Amino acid sequence: QVQLVESGGGSVQAGGSLRLACTAPGRIFSRANMGWFRQAPGKEREFVGSISRSGGTTYYAESVKGRFTISRDKDKNTVYLQMNSLKPEDTAVYYCAEKQTILSDNRYFGTASDYSHWGQGTQVTVSS
């Protein structure tokens, strides 16, 4: 069973920043599109953003566009979610997810069912 591992969550005040990281010990991300999702208490899991396997194409939810940035470091086999100007409504458990692709695919993958492997999640809490 593939296990993705998120880290970097925590508690910050509104306006602050956090950087989440996602890696998979023993697994290479180079052939995978990666996504970030979040789930707040009592709400559905929602798409935050995604990055193509080349790193050249990214997509973001409107609610985070301009504040969050996804990147990947192939040498470190890690995907990042840089979150700036955090708001209380960003409070949620954040998950990274992997979608294996045979060929390079820059299409939008914004639903949870697009992804086959998930991490356990990391809590982000933003206080006002």
Image: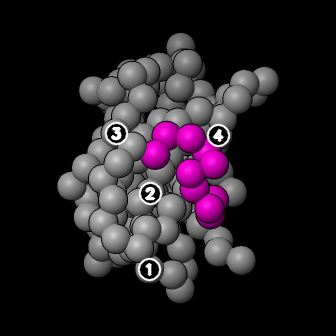
- Marks 3/1 in contact by CB < 8 Å: the verdict is no
Above or below: residue 63 compared with residue 48:
above
- State the residue position of label 4: 93
CA distance separating discs 4 and 3: 20 Å
Seen from this angle, which residue lies furthest top?
128
CA distance separating discs 2 and 4: 17 Å
Residue 95 drawn at (x, y percent): 59, 49
Q: Report helix, strand or loop for mark 1.
A: loop
Q: Residues within 10 Å of mark 3 (few under 14, many from 20)?
A: many
Of callouts 3 and 1, the N-terminal one: 1
Above or below: residue 91 compared with residue 77:
above
Of callouts 3 and 2, the N-terminal one: 2
CA distance separating discs 3 and 1: 22 Å
Kind of residue sitting beneath label 3: Tyr
Numbered circle sitting on residue 28: 1
Q: Report helix, strand or loop for mark 4.
A: strand
Q: Report helix, strand or loop for mark 3.
A: strand
Kind of residue sitting beneath label 2: Met
Residue 86 left/right relative to 46 = left
* Residue shown at the point (30%, 45%) measured from the top left: 58
Q: Does the stretch in magenta take in 114? A: yes
